[in-house]
Amino acid sequence: MARSPASEQGRPGTRKTWCDGTWVDSLPAGFNKDNIAAFYEVPGGCATPISDGNPVSFAVAASTSGGFLGLSEHLVDVPTQKWEVRLYSSPDLVHWTFMTTIRQTDGSWDTGDLHFPAFLSANDWRSDLVSENAFYVVGTINTSEPRMRALPGANRRDGRVHHEQYGEHHTELPDAAAAPLRW
């Protein structure tokens, strides 16, 4: 997990990573763009995992009732590989509690059907603020054509989920009668 003060607007060199209970510099001491080649073999800053398994992605949204919700795409080895999308909650963006597994398949990343999951609020187009009682989970589908998938349906204004990539428009029509995910 990494963060940068909002006042820095993500400027390089301002990020800190969570390491054993404290925030530390994310880059090695002395690093700068002028001597980048000297750091090719130098590990970055310490980082403590905030979840188990091999996380592929982790998306966060603030909850309208306070705290935060997190979506994690994972590869878990127990004893055979599983692909999962999990839902977490947090009061402070540091301490996360597992809530439920949303999707799961046996096998590698290729067996998953909802990659790089993100939140979408049930009543507007926000991905940063959702109700923990009703929201959508959107992500990509692992196909030869780039597509988006919504769980269980994206009955947005026209019932469609749109994804633009390289000037092409791909649309998947989810079940317009489906309700948002509710926990």
Image: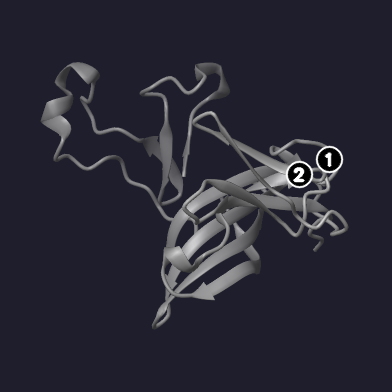
The answer to whether residue 131 is above or below residue 82 is above
Pointer 1: residues within 10 angstroms few (<14), some, or many (20+)? few
Q: Which residue is mark 2?
A: 160
Which mark, residue 90?
A: none
Secondary structure of the residue carrying tag 2 is: loop
Residue shown at 17% from the left, 39% from the top? 42
Name the residue at 66% across, 50% down: 138
Question: 87 or 93, which lies in front?
Answer: 87
Marks 2/1: CA–CA distance:
6 Å
Q: Quarter of the image holding residue 159?
A: top right
Query: What colour scheme governs how the chains and residues are painted in the rendered image of this protein?
Result: one colour
Classify the position of the C terminus by image quarter: bottom right
Vertical position of residue 83 compared to residue 93: above or below: below
Depth check: 21 or 183 in front? 183
Numbered circle sitting on residue 158: 1
* Point 58% across, 47% down: residue: 147
Left-right relation of 48 to 30 = right
Q: Place residue 29 in its image quadrant.
A: top left
Q: Are marks 2 and 1 in contact (CB under 8 Å)?
A: yes
Measured as percent of width and height from the top left, residue 52 is found at 46, 65
Residue 74 visible here:
yes
In-image side of 95 versus 162 (left or right) = left
Q: Is residue 9 above or below residue 67?
A: above
Q: Residue furthest left?
A: 38
Residue type, label 1: Asp
Badge 2 density bin: few <14, some 14–19, many ≥20, Cα 10 Å: some
Residue 81 coordinates in the image, percent (x, y): 41, 75
The residue sitting at 23% across, 21% down in the picture is 32
